[in-house]
Image: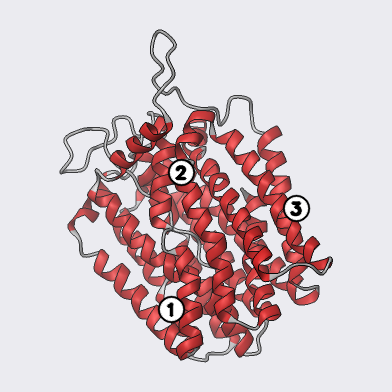
Amino acid sequence: MAVSLSGTRISAIALPWFVLVTTGSAAQTGLAAFCEMAPYVIVKALTGPLTDRVGPRLVSWTADAVSSVAAALVPLIHLAGVLSFPVLLVLVAVVGAARGPGDLAKEVMIPEVAERAHVPLERATGVSGVIERLAQTAGAAGGGALIALVGPLAGLALNAASFALGSLIIAFTLPRGVGLPEPSGTGPAGECGPGYWRRLGEGFTFLRGDLLLLTVIVMVAITNLLDAAFTSVLLPVWAKESGQGPAAIGLAGSAMGVASVAGSLVAAAVAHRLRRRPVFFAGFLLAGAPRFLVLASGAPLWAVATVFAVAGLGSGFINPIIGAVFFERIPRRLLGRVGALGDATAWAGIPLGGLIAGAAVTSVGLLPVLIVGGAMYFLTTGLAGLRREWREMDRLRGRGAAQPVGEGAPAPAAQPDPISPASRRSPEPP
């Protein structure tokens, strides 16, 4: 995860900057982000049953290998002088389509790791969050510096290399037996388990049965859209218009990343002892709107870095809580298909974030878009927090990994069935 996510974070700086400096268009920058993230969401949603059937290990290394090849073709074709914008869009679409199943497969293996280590899920997801934040920090710092010194093509090439290395690590270094498919209810006579569409339907039925997790997913879908707009368009345009350049993106991302590592470490150590609900919303309050508003204020770079650091501290607590609730409520055999549908729903707005932001900046300018984006972030998390079902989040606190994940977890108040529900994670802000 550390290797592949570091490369992805470098690419998240390199690709928008490459499109922006070669085309000069915020709208085309947003279109490139859309062409990567739309296939990511769609393919990720559809490969859940496949992940459950063949096992997350095989899906992970195969998907990373495909992403590596597609990512490597971008700099190679550009250096050959034949990289047109439509060809670039096709290649980033392939990267996105392959990265979705690869990311899902790694997430699905987390509860198995927690069970083998005999640690609470909050701690396992917290450690996973630390790894993600460290990768973000290294990727943002290294990517910003590399792109400023050498150019965005070097960042894209490094992304391809990280996918290749990540594929080899998953394929050859995990302990034997990790990431294999869970038993799927094969009959006594050896009949095959349910088919693809039935598996997908089981995931959908399971996902829609829990009001708490549906609320989480809808809220995260909106904040993800805003985060995608911020990362893929608003931040690069701010760096270009302010004259700060890509190094400022790297500095802001590094400040947020270092602080988010600290937040994730604290979450890994003590989150299973805290009430989830207040910590969850406090994290969103710090991680969301302030980033938009500090860029809109015209503050100096040191102030921007400070606000991003505070945002990182808050964001470090969010995903461990979402991940723990998610893994507690889903039987292991359904993790792939339910996780894929939950991810796809929560990430549905991400492909549109860049498109909307690019069109909005082109039409009215950067400043109004930053102000409106910050206000929407604040209202979304604040209004969602008023709903009654959030109390269910605290009822599940402290569940460990010793019991089968999802089996025997407390049911929500409106659901008498002890096995019900789902959720998904929010992507890290830059």
> On the picture, is 54 further left or further right than 293?
right
Mark nearer the viewer, 1 or 2: 2
Mark 1 vs mark 3: which is more N-terminal? 3
Cβ atoms under marks 1 and 2 closer than 8 Å = no
Quadrant hosting residue 410 = top left
What element does badge 1 sit on? helix
Tell me if mark 3 has few (under 14), some (14-19) or many (20+) residues whose alpha carbon lies within 10 angstroms of its own: many
The residue positioned 52% from the left and 91% from the top of the image is: 298
Q: Which residue bears the numbered disc 2?
A: 46
Nearer the observer, 23 or 257: 23
Residue 189 picture location, percent across and down:
41, 8
For the residues marked 1 and 3, what is the alpha-carbon distance in whole angstroms?
A: 34 Å
Q: CA distance from mark 1 to mark 2?
A: 35 Å
* Closer-to-camera residue (123/136): 136
Q: Give the SS element for disc 3.
A: helix
Which dot marks residue 290? 1
